[in-house]
Amino acid sequence: MADKVYRKDKLGEQRTALDRNRRKIYATQTVCALCGQPVDMSLRYPHPMSKTVDHIIPIARGGHPSDLANLQLAHLACNLAKSDSIAPPTCPKKARAVSNRNLPQ
């Protein structure tokens, strides 16, 4: 039977460091780094606006799994929308409505 391969942030000292840094982020940051809106710390998973820690450079793209400089506070929905991309997604809250009056002629 083949051994399972785990991500670096799931086991061992990387997991311990990630948990420690997650607590630091929750204690010091209050605004979602992806959309710029405040994060309600009382909301719990699976609420879409609950707090989560986002990897600035995703682990799948070579980012460090537990380095504090690679972690930021985000809403769960914003983090899921970002997925494994490096650039933050366009936030629907910040998007301007386009009416047919502004279309090119």
Image: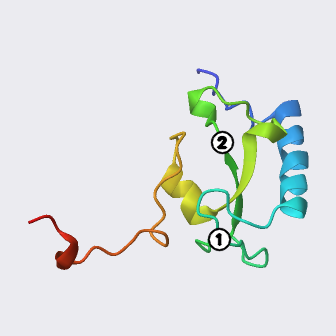
Residue 52: x, y in percent? 70, 59
Residue under the point 23% across and 78% down:
99
In the figure, residue 37 lies in which quadrant?
bottom right
Residue 1: x, y in percent? 59, 21
Residue 94: x, y in percent? 48, 69
Considering depth in this image, is 68 or 91 the residue closer to the camera?
91
Q: Residue furthest top?
A: 2
Q: How is the image coloured?
A: rainbow
Secondary structure state at the residue bearing disc 2? loop
Tell me which label, 2 or 1, sits earlier in the chain.
1
Residue under the point 17% across and 77% down:
100
Q: Residue furthest left?
A: 105
> Is 89 located above or below residue 49 in the figure?
above
Q: Which mark is residue 26?
A: none
**Label 1: few (<14), some or many (≥20) within 10 Å?**
some
How far, Cα to Cα, is label 2 from label 1? 17 Å
In screen coordinates, is 81 left or right of 39?
A: left
Q: Amino acid at mark 2?
A: Ile
Q: Amino acid at mark 1?
A: Gln
Residue under the point 73% across and 30% down:
64
Which residue matches tag 2? 56
In the figure, residue 41 lies in which quadrant?
bottom right
Q: Which mark is residue 37?
A: 1
